Amino acid sequence: MPGVLIVCGVPIGDVRDASPRLAEVLATADVVAAEDTRRVRRLAHALGVTIGGRVISCYDAVEGARAAALTERLLAGQTVALITDAGMPAVSDPGYRVVAAAAGAGAAVTVVPGPSAVTAALAVSGLPSDRFTFEGFLPRRGGPRQARLRELSGERRTMVFLEAPHRLAATLDDLVACFGAERPAVLCRELTKTWEEIVRGGLGRLVAWAHDGRVIRGEFTLVVAGLPAEAAPPGGGQAPADAVDLAAEVAKEEAAGLSRAQARRAVMARFGVSRAEVYAAVQAARGGRG
């Protein structure tokens, strides 16, 4: 008779959020497949249990091979616990290949629910949560990232993103360029941990926070409001009526907290116009003064 694959949610920061079932599974599973074997051993120690079965690694680079090996163990009747470093396996973490292989082979798959940075950030954001879309990590390079954000510029649902600290400032810059500085957003850093921080405001305020000279560290979950029902999607490749409108858009972005250069880039991206056109419009509005 096939065994059982147990997909285990683990704390995203505070170990006290772990469920009693998680401790039980760690102690009794025949195999614990972990993203980081050292971290799962530390987790077990913190929970006061000893892992009774074999511990094997299951991170991104080896997940495909591990999926086949773990499925063989399941078909032999063993119980396999699947665990990542934080949150739920397969949600922007390794795991979905293992689950798909197990289910495809006819093994039972069950879950130990646990904390999630996605739902935690959504809950504290104060933004509409009746409908939302989880976008995970955006592309790392600027061009593909901006293209993806332009696709999302007309999304009506609240959006949840994950981002690494070294890319956060660039991602916020691109969000402002595609969504506008006034779009409501909430940035959650180190949720449930000692240095938890929640920054609220328009995207322009979040950009100012990221560019104020601080050293950006930690894990980030970003919640961004969808486009209001009464608003038209920004941009769309259509330029505004005249240079006066361009200058007004730049002034609005600056008033929302962007620097002059950031405001100009945002208007360029939104209306599909060149740097020279925006510069000329701003200069004309100021009567030719620099």
Image: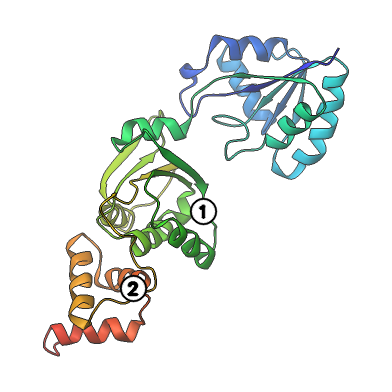
Q: Residue at x 21, y 60 (%)?
A: 257
The x and y percentages for residue 81 are 70, 21
Image quadrant occupied by the N terminus:
top right
Q: Secondary structure at mark 1?
A: loop
The x and y percentages for residue 48 are 59, 10
The x and y percentages for residue 152 are 44, 55
Relative depth, front residue between 201 and 229: 229
Q: Mark 2 is on which residue type?
A: Phe
The residue that disc 1 covers is 138
Q: Secondary structure at mark 2?
A: helix
Q: Residue at x 67, y 15 (%)?
A: 26
Note whether residue 290 is visible.
Answer: no
Asked where in the image residue 92 lies, by quadrant, the reply is top right
The x and y percentages for residue 237 are 39, 73
The residue that disc 2 covers is 271
Please state which of the two labelled residues, at mark 1 or mark 2, is closer to the viewer.
2
* Residue 267 against residue 211 in the figure, above or below: below
* Residue 34 against residue 161 in the figure, above or below: above
Task: Identify the colour scheme used.
Answer: rainbow
- The 10 Å Cα crowd at callout 2, few under 14, some 14 to 19, many 20 or more, is many
Note whether residue 250 is visible.
Answer: yes
For this view, does 45 lie left or right of residue 290? right
C-alpha separation, residue under disc 1 versus residue under disc 2? 22 Å
Query: How many numbered circles does the render carry?
Result: 2
In primary-sequence order, the first of circles 1 and 2 is 1
Extreme residue in the front direction: 230
* Residue 122 against residue 20 in the figure, above or below: below
Q: Residue at x 45, y 23 (%)?
A: 14
Image quadrant occupied by the C terminus:
bottom left
